[in-house]
Amino acid sequence: PGTAVRRLCYEKFKEAFPDDYQDILSAYNEANHIGSASTLNQHQQSFQKLYRRVASLLDSASTRFGFEAAIVFCGNIVNQDASLGHVHTTQSAAGFFETRCRANDDTIIGHLKAH
C-alpha cells in the first residue's frame, strides 16, 4: 500500500486504541526484535520483556474495558528455548486452562511447544 493508505490506517489504529497504541507498537517491535537477537541472553531477555509488556497490556485492557484473556507464551527453538514459557490469565480468566483444558501451566506450555 501507498503512503496515504498507511497514514490512514495508522490514524484509524490510533483512534481504535487511543490509550494503548504505543504499547501495542512497542510490543510488536519487541516481538520483531526477538527474532533478530544475536545472543542467547539477548533472546531470553527480549522474550521476558515482551511477556511482561503483553501481560501488562492485557491486565490494563481487563481493568479498563472488561476484556479477559488467557495466553500461553513459549519459545519455539527446541534446544535453546526450553526455559522460555509463561502462562498469563487476567483476573476473571484465572483457572481457565485448569478448568477447560484440564492442564496446569507447565502442561499447557508443553502442549504449545509440542504443537
Image (tube, rainbow, N blue to C red):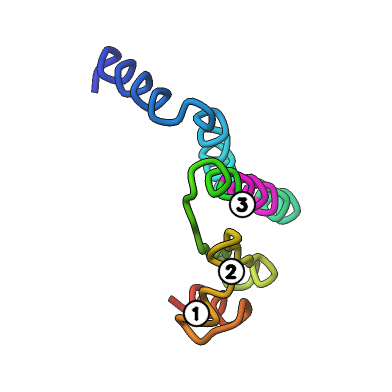
- What is the chief secondary structure element of the magenta stretch? helix
**Closer to the observer: label 2 or label 1?**
2
Which residue appears farthest toward the bottom when viewing the image?
102
Which quarter shows the N terminus?
top left
Mark-to-mark CA distance, 3 and 1: 20 Å
Identify the residue at image location x=64%, y=45%.
53
Q: In the figure, 9 relative to 98: above or below?
A: above
Identify the residue at image location x=60%, y=82%.
104
Question: Is residue 52 part of the magenta span, yes or no?
Answer: yes
Determine which residue is flagged by label 3: 55
**Closer to the observer: label 2 or label 3?**
2
User: Is residue 36 something one can see in this rendering?
Assistant: no
Indicate the secondary structure of the residue bearing disc 1.
Answer: helix
Q: In the figure, 20 relative to 95: above or below?
A: above
Identify the residue at image location x=52%, y=42%.
32
User: Is residue 66 something one can see in this rendering?
Assistant: yes
Determine which residue is flagged by label 2: 94
Which quarter shows the C terminus?
bottom left
Residue 79 placement (x, y as % from top left): 63, 72
Residue extent of the magenta highlight = 47-57
Classify 10 Å Cα crowding around label 2: few (below 14), some (14-19), many (20 and above).
Answer: some
Classify 10 Å Cα crowding around label 3: few (below 14), some (14-19), many (20 and above).
Answer: many
User: Which mark sits nearer the N-terminus, 2 or 3?
Assistant: 3
Looking at the picture, which amino acid does disc 2 mark? Ala
Looking at the picture, which amino acid does disc 3 mark? Ala
Indicate the secondary structure of the residue bearing disc 2.
Answer: loop
For residue 111, which numbered disc appears in the image? 1
For residue 77, which numbered disc appears in the image? none
Mark-to-mark CA distance, 2 and 3: 13 Å
